[in-house]
Amino acid sequence: MDRKKVLYIALMAVLVALLLFGQWYKRPLDMETITGVTDPDDLSISIIDSDLQQRDLNLSAGDEGFDEVLAQLQALQFRRPPTNLITSALSFLPSWSTTSKEVEDGDFSHLMITLSQPGADGERLYGYVGFWVDEWEYRDFDHGISLPLVMEDGKDIGQDLCAQLWDAATPVETAA
């Protein structure tokens, strides 16, 4: 074979490998895989509605409702966009994501979910997933950045989850 054919075959092999890796990377993942928290014993959830009223729900293993809420969260399926790999690799660059979302009346603007469990070294292991009007994200603590998540019917699922958790959550008093 001549040198150009070998180079062409090598280039094609690299491209195929990258495409396969991209498909593997964006496969559906559950909350456990996204956050790295495999056996949470604490859930902390904050919900903010369109009027900026906030409610919090804090549950520990053994509390009434803990298993039900955890099952709801574990049933969620997310996909990571392959562009997250570039963002993670370039996490030292300043973030330019300053878009604001328009919240419609009756919609929830934020859902912040923090799961935690005891770590191997005695410190707590935390995982974070957030919902902002119609987009999902997770916190990559290793790189110190938040990265987007994709979910089929993500806005509807996020708004429905907010509505379900709103009733169980406790209103947060704001300082006047």
Image: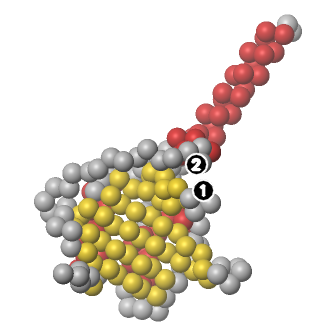
Residue found farthest to the front: 176
Identify the disc placed on residue 58: none
Report the front residue among 130 and 157.
130
Q: Residue at x 72, y 21 (%)?
A: 11
Expressed as whole percent of the image width and height from the top left, the position of residue 156 reads: 27, 57
**Circle 2 sits on which residue?**
91
Expressed as whole percent of the image width and height from the top left, the position of residue 117 reads: 57, 80
**Quadrant of residue 163 in the image?**
bottom left
Q: Residue at x 33, y 58 (%)?
A: 132
Label 2 Cα neighbours within 10 Å, binned few <14 / some 14-19 / many ≥20: some
Label 1: element kind: loop
Q: Is residue 82 left or right of residue 154?
A: right
C-alpha gap between disc 1 and disc 2: 6 Å
Q: Amino acid at mark 1?
A: His
Q: Is residue 86 above or below residue 156?
A: above
Expressed as whole percent of the image width and height from the top left, the position of residue 135 reads: 35, 53
Label 2: element kind: loop
Residue found farthest to the right: 1
Q: Amino acid at mark 2?
A: Ser
Image quadrant in which the N terminus is located: top right
Q: Are marks 1 and 2 in contact (CB under 8 Å)?
A: yes
**Quadrant of residue 3 in the image?**
top right
Expressed as whole percent of the image width and height from the top left, the position of residue 70 reads: 44, 77
Q: Is residue 54 left or right of residue 150?
A: left
**Circle 1 sits on which residue?**
143
Q: Is residue 87 above or below residue 103?
A: above
Image quadrant in which the C terminus is located: bottom left
